[in-house]
Amino acid sequence: MIAFAGQFERGPQERIPSREEVLEIISKLIEGDEIEHVREKYDDSGLYLFEVKIDDPETGESVHYEYRRKGTYPEGATAETVI
């Protein structure tokens, strides 16, 4: 898990990353593997959940990555913004 408290969470001036920013961070983590979008959820403030998966050609298994913005949502609560 990677926390982004210092990068996006700044008290009342919290900056919510765009879908493209989240995708860019995930792309760096998986080093060029093909990304399949699973789901994304928005509220009045913007993106709060973004889930993707990649298929590992060596093992044949799927690996899921999820961005969650801090807060409480229908899918659960998160104490800080994480991937």
Image (cartoon, rainbow, N blue to C red):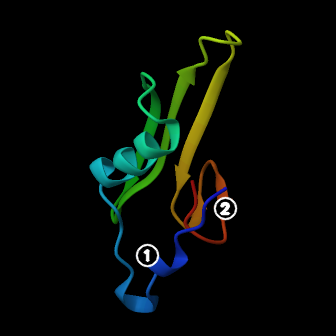
Q: Earlier in the sequence, mark 1 or mark 2?
A: 1
Say above or below: 16 vs 5.
above
Is residue 60 shown above or below 44? above
Q: Nearer the viewer, residue 28 or 20?
A: 28
Q: Is residue 63 left or right of residue 34?
A: right
What is the x, y in percent for residue 6? 49, 81
Residue 7's disc number: 1
Question: Which image quadrant for residue 77?
Answer: bottom right
Q: Is residue 46 left or right of residue 33?
A: left
Instruction: Please state, as top left, top right, bottom left or bottom right, where the N terminus lies in the image.
Output: bottom right
Place of residue 78 in the rendered image (x, y in percent of width and height, measured from the top left): 65, 64
Q: What's the residue type where badge 2 is placed?
A: Ala
Q: Residue at x 32, y 54 (%)?
A: 21
User: How far from the left and from the top, in percent, is residue 43?
Assistant: 38, 57
Instruction: Provide the secondary structure element on which disc 2 rests.
Output: strand
Residue displayed at 57% across by 53% down:
83
State the residue at coordinates (32%, 49%): 19
21 to the left or right of 31: left
Q: Which residue is mark 2?
A: 77
Under mark 1, the amino acid is Gln
Q: Secondary structure at mark 1?
A: helix
Residue 56: numbered disc: none
Q: Residues within 10 Å of mark 2 (few under 14, many from 20)?
A: few
How many labels, in total?
2
